[in-house]
Image (cartoon, rainbow, N blue to C red):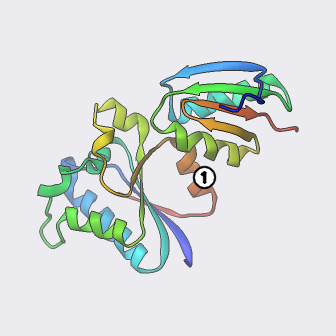
Amino acid sequence: MDPSVQADDVWDAGDMGCGELVFLLAQRTRALGPGKVLELVATDLGAPHDVPAWCRLTGNALLVANPPHYFIRSKES
Amino acid sequence: MAGKLCVSITNAKNDADRATVGFVVANAAVGSAQETMVFLSTEAVRLAVKGYADDIHEEGFAPLRDLLANFVKGGGTIFVCSPCFKKRGLDEKALVDGATIVGGAKVVEFLASGAPCISY
């Protein structure tokens, strides 16, 4: 884990995956506000591929991917 | 490669004909220089478990085990629906070569890049 990355909020999504995970992840990052960092904890088997794909699709920055931990900076606008 | 194609398969031994033809088309796509992804969801996730497809051989087609192996050897990728796999209590350590367990975002990313999709 990169100790220099500080999260503004943490969301433990447990074993949630697929559409439910990314739908709620979108709501979480939006609610957090632009430029803020969310630490996501997701144990779903698909998450190591899904979370980076979701970040690429939505323009949110994946700062750290160390499954099951992910640090995501919400996009600026 | 010239383009992309997704082949969505939702059947396994419950409809071996559809499962087989899906992989026949996927092999045709790989053989036609297309970046091809087979998306296995619902019942079809069973095809991603080693050994499951070994006794599926539809009349008029190659055995599904060979179709699957050739597809991967030809450069095709297999995405396996995570919640469908988990729901059936299957073993992620027994995946066939070339298969990856993914969720919706990974499939959406592939399709959003402009790939058409054919379903079986």
Picture mark count: 1
* Residue A67 spot, x, y in % from top left: 55, 33
- Left or right of A34? Residue B74 is left
Which corner quadrant holds the C terminus of chain B? bottom left
* Location of residue B15 with respect to A50 vertically, above or below: below
- Left or right of A17? Residue A7 is right
Q: Amino acid at mark 1?
A: Glu
* Location of residue B55 with respect to A24 vertically, above or below: below
* Residue at the (37%, 68%) spot, across then down: B26
* Residue at the (11%, 56%) spot, across then down: B55
* Location of residue A12 with respect to A48 vertically, above or below: above
> Which residue does the numbered mark 1 point to in the structure image?
B109
- Left or right of B57? Residue A10 is right
* Residue A44 spot, x, y in % from top left: 47, 31
Which corner quadrant holds the N terminus of chain B? bottom right
Residue sitting nearer the eye, A73 or A17: A73
Label 1: which secondary element: helix
- Left or right of B100? Residue A27 is right
* Residue B80 spot, x, y in % from top left: 40, 47
* Residue at the (62%, 63%) spot, across then down: B114
Chain of the residue where label 1 is placed in the rendered structure: B
In terms of image quadrants, where is residue A3? top right
* Residue A73 spot, x, y in % from top left: 78, 34
In terms of image quadrants, where is residue B25? bottom left
* Residue at the (41%, 34%) spot, across then down: B83
